[in-house]
Amino acid sequence: MTTQQFDWITDHRQRHTPPLRWWAIAALLLGVAFLLRSGQFGNPLKGLDEQYYLLVGDHMLHGAIPYVDLWDRKPFGLFALFAGIRLLGGDGVIQATIVATLFAAATACVVTAIALRSAPRTAAILAGIGYLVALQVLWGGIGQTPVFYNLLTALSAWLVLDTAPTLQRRGDLVRVLSAMLLSGLAIQIKTNAAFEGAALGLWLIWRAIRAGAPPRQLVALAATMIFVALLPTLAVAAGYAAIGHFNEFWYANVVSQFHKHGTLGQLALVRLGTMAGLSGPMLALLLVGCWRATRQWRRWHPEMVLLAMWSIAGLVDAFAIGGFWTHYALPLAVPAAILSAHAFAAPRWGYIAFGIYIAYPMVDAIVLDRISAGDETQLAARTVAAIPDDVTTQCLLTYEGPVIYYHLKHACLVTPFAFTGHLRSSAEADALGVDSAAAMKAALSRRPGTILTVEGSLWKERNLVNDRIVAAEIRRNYVAIARLPHTHQQTGQEWIIVWRRKDLATGSRTLPGETPDFG
């Protein structure tokens, strides 16, 4: 297929898709998104990271400053997004999952639109559905960051694909700068989105070089794209500098990642195996689709080059910071889904491959997820009832367990390191900007009225120093008032222990003989 033939097919398919049919496609993908994801609507325990994003967003509406009052290394834009979600009312749990579902459906629409440039309509629609299925498989069924920023990246790609190589057509430069601004906003959802943005920028430069653009134009284009992509982050940095907290911003967003431990340790390698296994079918479809789209790797139209570069950027994104949690592969789901359209378009076996690919994830999402969500919602309700109501004034410390209980009980906090992974994890011991043991002692010195711990914990990368500090404090000043089942989101059964400060436990039913046991 020549470049001219490819461009004619692309133009023909785009011009001959009536608006009404696009609405039907969007409605179909939105319906599939809700079908796959609605089983977890209202489940407060699904997604530990998302629980913390909601907590920080809620506290921002009450004046808290990320990195100062509540610490994390995620970009400011993510927390601002969840603060906006909190404005939708309710407790934010179901609202966050619905917003994430809308983002997922919108991304699936963009996947279909890009795939339709070179694949048949039915196969392109199946690619959009395949993207939604990939989110479920790769732990993106709630509100992990790529569920949001994948849309921005996909829109960026859609914009640049519709430009001429030397950007000489009317509106081309606006499309490119808009794409870079969207990439910059994606970086404010998760810093790793810079890899995908860089891939788009490099593709534009490569294409301009092939078209004979002079060096001066190339340098000006590259500098302008980089500046526009950095604008959102520069604006946030300037805001923190203006309020005197630039150092906290810089450490959390840049320095802290380099101080983490265990990102390539034995447990991380076990997680790598899990990630590889779950993403294997998606990668197979990516390779088969790319093989068919390039005529057995022989004919690389610029659009296929972009999809290949985007896929490589997604792989770099997945591996860049180590740790190898399965959801790190979510950014790869977008280019993989687009390329999979060519696999689904294969005569005889394409539809069969699609059916095999979606079969178990659909059953898992539609049937099994609803069962587990019902169980977890009941467990959460029991735990909320067991936590004393005076945590609003006497405060709560969740040393280990779901951080959503801070939010659901409107508890006051005793530490900016409220995410349980910060103080209980050995990986974070030197990455908080302060001594983790000192931070633990400072939290306990505020004498929280209630502490949550996990008995029989399945978390193995433990901060043993902090384990000892917390255990000693509990033995001296706390009694257990409840022991509740808690299903670990990955590996099995744990128990949440609710500890009450002794001077507040008068009249409370206690559990004699209960001692701190962190696994």
Image (cartoon, rainbow, N blue to C red):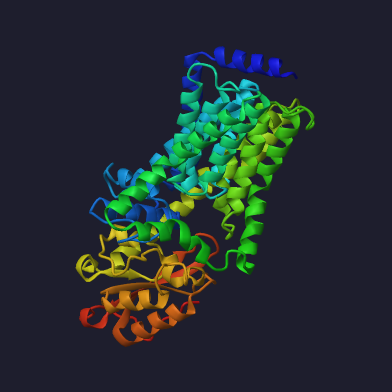
Horizontal and vertical percent for residue 498?
Answer: 34, 73
Residue at 59 percent of width and 51 percent of height: 318
Q: Does the rendering let one see residue 104?
A: no
Place of residue 68 in the rendered image (x, y in percent of width and height, measured from the top left): 32, 61
Query: At x 59% / y 39%, what residue is drawn?
Result: 199
What x and y, as percent, mark residue 111? Answer: 56, 31
Q: Residue farthest to the front? A: 216
Vertical placement of residue 280 versus 512, above or below: above
Could you say which is closer to the camera, residue 229 or residue 98?
229
Q: Nearer the viewer, residue 491 or 143?
A: 143
The answer to whether one can see residue 117 in this image is: yes
Q: On the image, which quarter does residue 337 sit in? A: top right
Q: Quadrant of residue 130?
A: top right
Residue 166 picture quarter: top right
In the picture, which quadrant includes the N terminus? top right
Up-down: is 45 above or below 455? above
